[in-house]
Amino acid sequence: MPTLVLPSVAVVPSVAKDTDVLVVGLAKASGNDVAVGVPDDVAAWFVKSVGRELAEVAGDLGASSKTATTALLPGPKGLRLIVVGLGDIDVTPEQVRRATGAALRAAAGLVGDRPLVVAISLDTIEPQVIKGAVEGALLGAYTFRPAGKGKPGIAGVMIVTTNKRPEAKQAVELGVGTATAVCQARTWVNTSPHLLYPESFADDIRSAARSKSLAVEVWDDKALERDGFGGLLAVGGGSSRKPRLVKVSYAPRGAKFHLALVGKGITFDSGGLNIKTAEGMYTMKSDMAGAASVVGAISAIAEAGIRIRVTAYAALAENLPSGTAYRPSDVLTIYGGTTVENGNSDAEGRLVLADALVKASEEGPDLIIDVATLTGACVIALGDRVAGLMARDDQTADLILDAAEAAGELFWQLPLPEEARGKLDSRVADLKSTGDRAGGALTAAAFLSEFVPPALSWAHLDIAGPAFNSHEPYDYTPAGGTGMSVRTLVALAHALAN
Ligand code: BES
Ligand code: MN
Ligand code: ZN
């Protein structure tokens, strides 16, 4: 399995001598672009050797205060400067996250035969902004390294701040923890699907969770049969690599809230017998992004020691066509006994989630959230950078939207209309897995809702669009797996903890 190596991060009061690249900012203040965080000696060097102010030169080289634009400038003694746009001078954590992300992507492009040390000097003092700078930097510096293809990257990131209080160090730790989890999720998504399949993914989750002292339970195919997980078994039946259900538990002393997370983990979605087009299939190694997110999130929550009980389930299967594949019109029995008529073998995510949602509900958590690359319809509705959010009650929806806002992730609430359930009537089973084309994201959610007892709070995150970036990298988002939703889940845990 590919390895994840992240730069080390430290808080420093001033730019150290061994710095290779220095990141400074340009921000808009009462109509003008002003330089931010430029050390006095660097500013003086510019005036002396170039004859002009750094901000002017940067402007001529295409730099501006527009958030996350970058320009490369020379500096004293071979130091290289990256001038990054911050937007309005009253920076938000997300502005800084985007800016340091773009800056570190630019810095990663400068790496030659030895790793680089990058200092970020953006006058960041507020803990939330420092945390944003750290997250942006690590997320922007991320590169996927397939096993055996290691090359040097960014070795260290120094956050230059005058904040000497413990809150600054704590902000860095939280930022590192969250960014590490996001990068872990990205690497799982990016890994070749012939290497990452239900069993190997389960093994990897087990070792990741054990290193955080989390409890792990894995159902292999025998155990799934014994306990009657008919969704996972049907969907995984076409592949020689058998399905798994993984449960990861974090139960700190004194926790008052129990959050259950359920992730869709289709390690490759070919569509099965209802096979996808070549174009539609190409990115489907990312169909386990929901599972990667919930495991990433619980790891970061445990690492930060947040006082909340969390149980995460990863529902893992590979959806392939074969002589043992499940068929359209097959009737399967979900864990707990509900029978489902399979409408389309490409609507596999809801079946594995149904099994896991019933299982997760057994413990009566205070809130269940499932995360899934569930529907193409959601991508058509919201595009590829915004995720759909559906919730049983608006209070839960607002909690998640607030967490997303704090984390800098884009969600948009979609409704759960009662009529959506009407499309799922079956003549031969308790319900059918698919409706018609209209409102596909809502029908899918209506199906899932049937597997969570009405008394429980439940929300559904459809990350089909933003989980995987098929276009050019931007800000702190690379091409490929994005780790979208990890930051929101961690922020939500902070908000729900006592
Ligand atoms: N994994 C796909 C959804 C998807 C599409 C994710 C595009 C990311 C990008 C899912 O399993 C699927 O195939 N859904 C079908 C459902 C349909 C058959 C009811 C879809 O959206 O077409
Ligand atoms: Mn599918
Ligand atoms: Zn799928």
Image: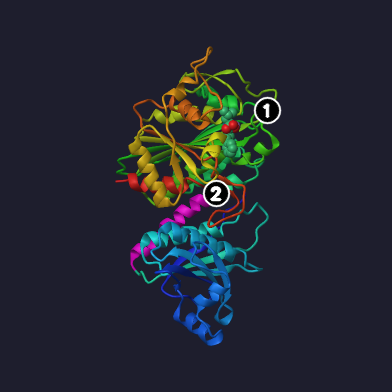
- Report whether residue 213 is seen: no
- Residue count near mark 2 (Cα–Cα under 10 Å), binned few <14, some 14–19, many ≥20: many
Q: Determine which quarter of the picture holds residue 115.
A: bottom right
User: Residue 481 at what x, y percent from top left?
Assistant: 57, 47
- Residue count near mark 1 (Cα–Cα under 10 Å), binned few <14, some 14–19, many ≥20: many
- Report whether residue 293 is seen: yes
Tag 1 secondary structure: loop
Check whether the beta carbons of the residues at disc 1 and disc 2 lie within 8 A of each other.
no
Q: Determine which quarter of the picture holds residue 367.
A: top left
Residue drawn at 45 percent across, 30 percent down: 357
Residue drawn at 62 percent across, 67 percent down: 110
497 displayed left or right of 88: left
- Main structural element of the magenta stretch: helix, strand or loop? helix
Q: Amino acid at mark 1?
A: Pro
- Provide the residue designation for mark 1: 321
Tag 2 secondary structure: loop
* Dot label at residue 482: 2
80 displayed left or right of 113: left
**Start-end of magenta stretch:** 165-185
Q: Nearer the viewer, residue 351 or 205?
A: 351
Q: How many marks?
A: 2
Residues under labels 1 and 2: Cα distance? 28 Å
Which label's residue is closer to the chain start, 1 or 2? Answer: 1
